[in-house]
């Protein structure tokens, strides 16, 4: 064997080559970012003299984005990325694509896609809720998605809702209209894109962000560069006149996963170079990180050209053995690895993930023993990382006194330098409340009380106030209950098929996390409809008369110390008159955990509120008649029937006074500025699942 082919021996470990086996892909990127920053900050190596090399271009794109998010300036070399791979560019192209189609062809996903470029998910939810409320107030029955689609076709509907979200959505609708006019007028691809970009109004926001520092500024600069590249490409299309229409060209860019050819190579950037071994050919760096050296990824022993047998073109009559072909591939992969390692002058770092699903490559046998993640990699070597380290040391009860003193001094220095997050005055929970005024002030407007929320208020004040301020996202189970309430309201007979058809026609209004959840809820809905039909048949057989469905009521409760009264208001599911002349109020319940005994509902505040409304004459159809109390219609099987009817007796002096005292207590809480959370009794109960659980769930990063 030639001397230069012999394996080296006797060389001491000097740290110039290190291997790391990490627990996850996120930890791998954390370690790479930490080591690169140490090389730059501690050893003074320029960013441009460092490189990260991965096996293929998919890894390159992911590493570039992940390292940039960890404050490591990066620049990919080699093949460019496709324009549509950038989110902001894809949004511009999708708006043009959807605008070119007829509005009748749009679906809910198209509408959300167009609006999503200007509104975030929370704003979209607010907008849909406002449109839905306006629809109901006008007597319409369209769902939130339907009114959103209609408003995008007719921007005037957005103008009727005077909210910031509606005004921004109106601009989006006007953009769609402008693009449609441009397509009809024969506008160029550049002009169509400019119409969308100008209407979105994101230029100023991105320009201001790009002037700063940190990951947000880096992302803003990448977005602006991508948009500029898109406009350059559109301009070149107009100059080439290659026979394709502007719309066809933009759609080809949207659907393409391949970047346009570049006639010139990009100048060497100031950041860390991220590339494949082929992209780093002819270059040399001080430090090279070879990332993602996984088993099955590097070496990749899959024989090339297996689908079309292209390897036969280079062979003669004697076909090679499959083992020989695989050996050739292995040699190619080893040459790629040798090429990547040889790009480094001083230091080589090789990383891989070692978890339950994958492990390091066999190439690790050629390297020093693999190390785990160093402890310091838990925090990035950045100003934000230093702030995090010292804040944890200062607030951790396990920290020593000397560690706390050191952390406090370091935070003071960082705060004097203006580093974000270092000043304790800016820490979460330390800043004073923005307002100490009551959430509900009867001096400015009547204080409205919902019977259905009285029980939540009594159980947990925090749970009530979160829901009252719009923090309840709703669930599919609640949506199913709403459908059954609507079916009961519209029911004119006990025909089960008609009830189910009513529910089935509106089933598409519900959203489920997965298809199997929707199928399960559909089976449950069918069962509930069957139980509801059984109740209606029994009521008709017993001579029970439906007086009113969903009547609205309002009961004023004077407040001597306020300018306006409290108003107990709501809707009653069903008011029935029995053959003996008694009027009974019915409240439908579809939950699995609803009580079915009379004792459990004797003090039910919702039923009591309905009885108070009946006594005060707030239900006009039965004012002055004989009261027969109130009951729940629980669609849950009992020993004697497919449903339960727990009954609350009519008011007497004692029960009436007790309920009015509960209302006074609710008014006092609603007028307050502090809301108690019974942590042990309610908030931490795993079976309650209240909104107040937001303060009982620990941080994701907590140990």
Image (spheres, rainbow, N blue to C red):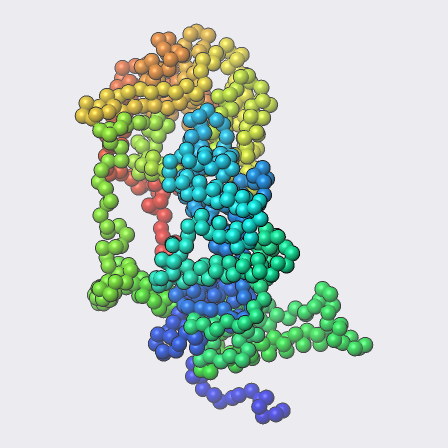
* Image x and y of residue 321, in percent: 75, 75
In this rendering, position of residue 587 left or right of residue 397: right
Give the answer, above or below, for where 220 lies relative to 517.
Answer: below
Residue farthest to the bottom? 3
Give the answer, above or below, for where 516 lies relative to 491.
Answer: below
Give the answer, above or below, for where 147 lies relative to 615.
Answer: below
Residue 355 visible somewhere in the drawing: no
Count of numbered circles on the image: 0
Residue farthest to the top? 580
* Image x and y of residue 543, in percent: 50, 10
| Residue situated in front as seen by the camera: 609 or 78 | 78
Location of the N terminus (image quadrant): bottom right
* Image x and y of residue 76, in percent: 49, 69
In this rendering, position of residue 103 left or right of residue 428: right
Give the answer, above or below, for where 346 lies relative to 121.
Answer: below
> Which residue is at a point 54% across and 59% down the rendered structure image?
235
Residue farthest to the left? 561
> Which residue is at a point 37% across and 41% down the rendered structure image?
164
């Amino acid at each position: 064997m030639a001397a230069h082919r012999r394996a080296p021996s006797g060389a001491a470990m000097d740290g110039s080559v290190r291997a790391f086996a990490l627990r996850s892909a996120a930890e791998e990127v954390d370690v790479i970012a930490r080591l690169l920053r140490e090389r730059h900050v501690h050893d003074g190596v320029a960013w441009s003299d460092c490189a990260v090399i991965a096996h293929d271009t998919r890894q390159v794109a992911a590493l570039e984005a992940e390292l940039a998010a960890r404050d490591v300036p990066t620049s990919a070399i080699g093949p460019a990325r496709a324009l549509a791979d950038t989110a902001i560019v894809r949004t511009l192209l999708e708006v043009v694509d959807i605008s070119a189609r007829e509005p009748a062809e749009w679906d809910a996903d198209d509408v959300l896609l167009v609006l999503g470029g200007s509104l975030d998910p929370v704003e979209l939810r607010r907008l849909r809720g406002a449109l839905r409320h306006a629809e109901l107030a006008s007597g319409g029955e369209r769902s939130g998605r339907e009114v959103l689609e209609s408003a995008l076709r007719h921007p005037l509907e957005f103008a009727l809702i005077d909210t910031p979200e509606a005004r921004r959505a109106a601009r989006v609708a006007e953009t769609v209209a402008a693009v449609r006019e441009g397509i009809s007028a024969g506008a160029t691809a550049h002009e169509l894109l400019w119409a969308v970009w100008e209407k979105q109004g994101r230029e100023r926001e991105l320009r201001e962000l790009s002037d700063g520092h940190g990951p947000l500024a880096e992302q803003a600069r990448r977005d602006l560069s991508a948009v500029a590249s898109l406009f350059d490409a559109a301009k070149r299309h107009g100059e080439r006149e290659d026979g394709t229409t502007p719309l066809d060209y933009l759609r080809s860019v949207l659907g393409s996963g391949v970047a346009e050819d570049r006639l010139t190579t990009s100048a060497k950037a100031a950041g860390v170079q991220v590339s494949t071994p082929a992209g780093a050919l002819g270059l040399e760096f001080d430090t090279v990180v070879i990332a993602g050296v996984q088993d099955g990824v590097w070496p990749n022993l899959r024989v090339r050209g297996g689908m079309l047998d292209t390897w036969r073109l280079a062979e003669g009559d004697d076909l090679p053995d499959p083992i020989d072909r695989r050996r050739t591939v292995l040699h190619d992969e080893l040459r790629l690895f040798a090429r990547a390692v040889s790009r480094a002058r001083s230091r080589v770092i090789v990383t891989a993930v070692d978890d339950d699903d994958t492990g390091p490559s066999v190439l690790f046998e050629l390297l020093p023993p693999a190390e785990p993640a160093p402890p310091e990699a838990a925090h990035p070597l950045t100003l934000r990382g230093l702030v995090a380290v010292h804040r944890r040391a200062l607030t951790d009860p396990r920290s020593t006194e000397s560690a706390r003193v050191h952390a406090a001094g370091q935070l003071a220095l960082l705060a004097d330098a203006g580093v974000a997050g270092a000043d304790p005055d800016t820490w979460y929970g330390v800043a004073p409340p923005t307002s100490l005024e009551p959430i509900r002030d009867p001096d400015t407007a009547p204080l409205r009380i919902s019977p259905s929320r009285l029980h939540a208020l009594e159980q947990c004040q925090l749970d009530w106030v979160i829901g009252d301020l719009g923090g309840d996202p709703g669930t599919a189970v609640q949506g199913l209950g709403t459908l059954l309430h609507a079916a009961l309201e519209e029911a004119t007979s006990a025909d089960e098929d008609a009830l189910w058809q009513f529910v089935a026609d509106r089933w598409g209004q519900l959203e489920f996390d997965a298809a199997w959840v929707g199928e399960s809820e559909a089976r449950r809905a069918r069962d509930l409809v069957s139980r509801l039909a059984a109740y209606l048949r029994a009521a008709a057989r017993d001579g029970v008369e439906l007086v009113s469905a969903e009547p609205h009521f309002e009961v004023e409760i004077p407040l001597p110390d306020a300018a306006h009264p409290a108003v107990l208001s709501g809707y009653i599911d069903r008011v029935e008159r029995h053959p003996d002349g008694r009027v009974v109020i019915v409240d439908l319940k579809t939950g699995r955990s609803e009580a079915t005994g009379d004792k459990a509902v004797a003090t039910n505040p919702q039923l009591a509120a309905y009885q108070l409304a009946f006594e005060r004459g707030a239900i006009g159809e039965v004012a002055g008649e004989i009261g027969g109390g109130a009951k729940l219609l629980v669609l849950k099987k009992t020993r004697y029937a497919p449903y339960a009817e727990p009954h609350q007796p009519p008011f007497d002096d004692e029960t009436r006074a007790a309920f009015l005292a509960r209302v006074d207590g609710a008014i006092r809480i609603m007028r307050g500025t502090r809301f108690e959370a019974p942590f042990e009794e309610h908030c931490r109960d795993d079976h309650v699942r209240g909104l107040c659980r937001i303060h009982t769930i620990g941080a994701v990063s907590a140990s």
